[in-house]
Image: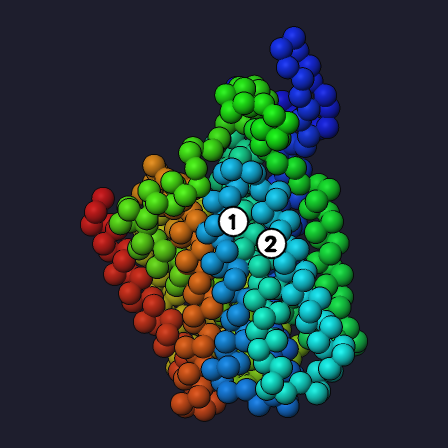
Amino acid sequence: MAQVIVDSVMLENEESKFSLAGNPTRGLIGATIGFFVGFAAVSLFGPTAKLLDRNMMMSSVQLGLLVAMPSLSGSLLRIPFGAWVDTTGGRKPFLILLALSALGMAGLCSLLYFVGPEQLTISTYPLLLLFALLSGCGIATFSVGIGQVSYWYPREKQGWALGAYAGLGNIAPGLFSYLIPLLIGVIAITGTYLIWLIFLLIGIAYYALAAPNAYYFQLRKQGHSRDESREIAGNHGQELFPQGGALEGLIRAAKIWKTWPLVFLYFTTFGGFLALTAWFPTYWQEYFNKPLAVAGGLTMLYSVLASVIRVPGGSLSDRIGGVRSIMISMTVMLVGAGLLALGASFGTALAGLLLMAIGMGVNNAGVFKLVPQYIEEAVGGGSGWVGGLGALGGFVIPPLMGYFVEVRGTEGYANGFLVFVALSLVSLGMVYLLKKSE
């Protein structure tokens, strides 16, 4: 079927009148930029937690909870908001999530301006948690954008489009982990967060102007029936259409046992990615006494590598299969976690960081290679469970690592990576079960 690119034109025939705005490239760019500005909230407190803690005297567990809080809303909201795309398209859920994130950032800026970062006490801790929870809503745009981009592109181009969307959007946390310390050195923490809020508002405005829904959803909004919308959108290049209600897909996917090993695998590596992006700035500062700017640079190295390697990781999964690529990647991650847990030297830790980034990134690509293979009758619902509950690792893991610091002191920053050793071993067992079922 030939694809016709239509951008804000009116088309008419004898039976109906309709307008179709945008094209796949515009939809991809808009969704990617929207995801980029929302996903940056992963780094909300990682680079600044020790600065905020000067007078608050948080415990290590409280500190871990604070840096992880954005990932709580950013993971759980992926499930309902991702499923919502099937009924209304991506624009409405995307804009709501970004608006909530902006509200959280505005609250945080107001708190720092009127109270002052040096005057924060433990009594303000609940407010910080609330603003972190709201700011993290932008992280949930991932699942919304996956659906929005998928509906724009034909099947043979979806792998590339989704790889570009996820890979480029995932760069945001690492980039912000590097930029935040630099900005703090120039304009202090309050000014840094204010600039972040302005950046977020600009991103929301761009998304609102430049990221239309796929043609089917535009036609449904104009009052056309489902069948008529499918026919017209299909004639203009759209191949993927909603298959039933959102709740139905979630229920169907939940009944397929293979959904849950995939959830655990994604919990380990994507949830782990979120956790380490928030945790690494503190780790490098406290365990190796690195300056804030260096800690941010090392975190950016980890985050960017884990993000961009998803693209070749997807190609590897296409060549050797998702299960084999996951087995290899989880073994690489296990070795990396072991090196970090040893805590012998900076060079050893750096090698561990690189191996964990490679293993996590390749696994993340492999998991979504298996979703349509193992959950083909409920791909949307399966993606919601895997993406949503898997990302919850970003909330669960940092407090667990913080517990090691609470018990072991500074050595606990290295010992905390035993959490990833355990997760890697269990994940290899999950992959074995999937392989045996083939």
Which residue occupies 43% across, 71% down? Answer: 397
The disc, 2 or 1, on the residue closer to the chain's N-terminal end is 1
Extreme-left residue of the structure: 436
Relative vertical location of residue 392 with respect to residue 347 in this rendering, above or below: above
The three-letter code of the residue at mark 1 reads Phe
Q: Is residue 21 left or right of residue 186?
A: left
Which residue occupies 54% across, 55% down? Answer: 140
Front residue of 347 and 241: 241
Percent position of residue 195, x then y:
76, 66
Which residue is identified by label 2? 97
Q: Considering the numbered disc 2 on the image, is that residue within a helix, a strand or a loop?
A: helix
Mark sitting on residue 163: none
The three-letter code of the residue at mark 2 reads Leu
Relative vertical location of residue 416 with respect to residue 396 in this rendering, above or below: below
Which residue is identified by label 1? 81
Percent position of residue 199, x then y:
74, 59
What is the crowding at mark 2: few (fewer than 14 residues within 10 Å), some, or many (at least 20)? Answer: many
Look at the image and tell me in which quarter the C terminus lies: top left
Mark 2 and mark 1 in contact? Answer it, CB < 8 Å: yes
